Image (cartoon, rainbow, N blue to C red):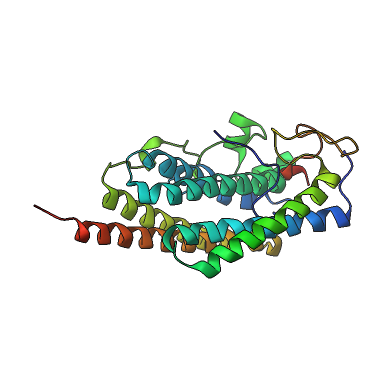
Amino acid sequence: MFVYEKKLLYPVKVSSCNPKLAKYLIEQYGGADGELAAALRYMNQRYTIPDKVIGLLTDIAMEEFSHLEMIATMVFKLTKDATPDQIRDAGLEPHYVNHGSALYYENAGGIPFNASYIAGKGDPIADLYEDIAAEEKARATYQYIIDLSDDPDLNDGLKFLREREIVHGQRFREAVEMLKENYSERKVF
Amino acid sequence: MKQPTVKAMNLLEQLQALDFTLVELRLYLHTHPDDEKALQQYNETAGQRVTLKEQVEEEFGSLAPNEPFTPGQASGWGEGLWPWQL
């Protein structure tokens, strides 16, 4: 079961209302390499991954949901006081017409979230390599958003998230090595 | 709704820091289960968390469901400000 704890993984601050930045950030909310995709990917792989890796996948999946909440908080804070003019200037009119000021699982181009962003191959090495690639792609996306952002408070949170992708990638690489050791120890009679 | 005091926000940030330490150490321990120093640090941090969480809940109310509502606390879990409202 899930238990919600009423606080963020890391404090989220934004300097000012900035719907343009929210438009970029939504890529990490409902995009191919975003936090929703990450959380769902790891949650779903747990059932067929070797026992040794289930704990790691579960903890990282939980952390990805916490990242998702941080991104949602960023988007909310960047847009909550936006005027229709600001929304128009940010190119968010199509979103506004469809969703008002609600958040939505879509990418920066407005394409809705799709389960085809996630693979579940049922092969531990294939799945873990997919996870490593996903973390690297998420890290690169955070870097691109930081490059475009001029909000120091927002960037503090984004740099934390970028760092976490590196740590997750490292843990997944170690998990691959653990499984490889297992394979080499397997006795054949 | 009234925003929390600076003191309350400082306590919350301290708890966030402790909890992040636990998240990070737990991930590390999954792939380094024999690292006794990391395990000891994890257990010490988890111990410190108990008192700090009580202090935070005195300011903000319960952080999670399935916990008793303590009389005198700000509110139950479903009331008060949510993380994105702070």
Q: Residue at x 59, y 47 (%)?
A: A66
Is A174 left, or right, of B6 in this rendering? Answer: left
Q: Position of residue A121 (x, y in %)?
A: 28, 42
Q: Position of residue A8 (x, y in %)?
A: 67, 49
Q: Position of residue A175 (x, y in %)?
A: 36, 58
Is A137 left, or right, of A62 in this rendering? Answer: left
Residue farthest to the left? A189
Q: Position of residue A122 (x, y in %)?
A: 28, 41
Nearer-the-camera pick, A2 or B29: B29
Is B31 left, or right, of B26 in this rendering? Answer: left
Can residue A90 be seen at all in this image of the molecule? no
Nearer-the-camera pick, B27 or A71: B27
Q: Quadrant of residue A149?
A: bottom right
Residue farthest to the bottom? B37
Q: Residue at x 82, y 51 (%)?
A: B55
Nearer-the-camera pick, A16 or A62: A62
Nearer-the-camera pick, A166 or A77: A166
